[in-house]
């Protein structure tokens, strides 16, 4: 009888780490698509512009108990495109278009239920800003700038299956030249 009891205890001890690994829904490689609200502004100007941001991301997370840490990268674009007339002279036009945004960073979070993760994120971001000035007389002047910045954010991610999840996230990005973004996004993704 002792042999059977010992064998049962040994089997339970060996199986417990395997069960713990299977119950870690936030571990592994993930890919996701995102879409959301994009508010773009320039410091000291009251003329913020609204649009839609959309893109894709990839990341890798490791769950350790109730904690999760990971790295991530993302590329997005924006529909923010603004033109103003009469900037320097009557009839001229200045247009600014927000382009692609590349982000690389990390996140750390904690479980708030069996399948929900609350996390914070931080990292480097680089946005493209394209401007075009039409002076009415003469040739148009076009200029494109890549602006470096820092992104901070927080979000909730919920596992909806063994390999899929949905998320909602707020993030703030601060770039060179007083340029900034406030974004609220939702996403859906898959974990491998």
Image (spheres, rainbow, N blue to C red):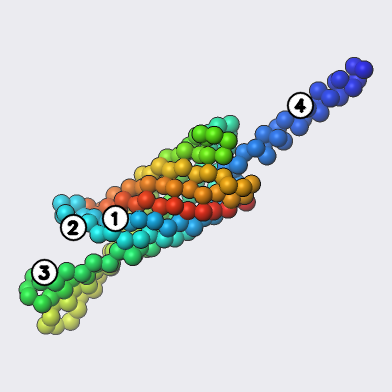
Q: Extreme top residue here?
A: 2
Q: Write down the residue under mark 1.
A: 39
- Residue 104 horizontal side relative to residue 165, left or right: left
Considering only order in the chain, which callout, 2 or 3, is on the residue closer to the N terminus?
2
Q: Left or right: 83 with respect to 57?
A: left
Label drawn at residue 47: 2
> How packed is label 4: few (under 14 Cα within 10 Å), some, or many (20 or more)?
few
Image point (64%, 46%), residue name: 162
Q: On the image, numbered disc 4 is attached to which residue?
A: 13
Among numbered discs 4 and 2, the one appearing first in the sequence: 4
Residue 138 drawn at (x, y percent)? 14, 83
Give the percent coordinates (x, y) of residue 48: 22, 56
Instruction: Look at the numbered disc 1 and give the secondary structure of its residue.
Output: strand
**Mark 3, residue position:** 87
Quick check: marks 3 and 2 in contact, CB under 8 Å?
no
Quadrant of the rendering where the N terminus is positioned: top right
Residue 177 % position (x, y): 22, 55
Q: Earlier in the sequence, mark 1 or mark 4?
A: 4
Judge depth for marks 3 and 2 and give the one in front: 2
Residue 126 in sight here: no
Q: What is the distance, in whole Å, between disc 3 and disc 2 at their CAs?
A: 14 Å
For the residue labelled by badge 3, is the local secondary structure a helix, a strand or a loop?
A: loop
Q: Earlier in the sequence, mark 2 or mark 1?
A: 1
Whether residue 165 is visible to the viewer of this picture, yes or no, is: yes
- For discs 3 and 1, the disc positioned in front in the rendered view: 1
Pick the front one: 98 or 53: 53
Alpha-carbon neighbours of circle 2 within 10 Å: few (<14), some, or many (≥20)? few
């Amino acid at each position: 009888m002792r042999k059977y009891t010992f064998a049962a205890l040994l089997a339970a001890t060996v199986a417990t780490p395997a069960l713990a690994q299977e119950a870690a829904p936030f571990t592994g490689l993930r890919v996701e698509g995102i879409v959301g609200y994009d508010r773009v502004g320039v410091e000291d100007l009251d003329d913020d512009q609204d649009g839609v941001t959309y893109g894709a991301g990839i990341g890798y997370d490791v769950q350790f108990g109730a904690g999760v840490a990971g790295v991530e990268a993302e590329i997005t674009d924006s529909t923010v495109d603004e033109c103003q007339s009469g900037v320097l002279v009557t009839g001229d036009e200045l247009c600014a278009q927000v382009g692609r945004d590349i982000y690389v960073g990390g996140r750390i979070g904690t479980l708030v239920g069996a399948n929900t993760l609350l996390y914070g994120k931080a990292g480097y971001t680089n946005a493209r800003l394209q401007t075009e000035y039409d002076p009415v007389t003469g040739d148009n002047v076009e200029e494109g700038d890549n602006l470096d910045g820092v992104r901070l954010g927080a979000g909730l991610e919920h596992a909806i299956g063994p390999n899929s999840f949905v998320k909602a996230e707020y993030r703030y990005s601060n770039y060179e030249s007083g340029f900034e973004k406030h974004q609220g996004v939702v996403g859906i993704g898959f974990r491998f």
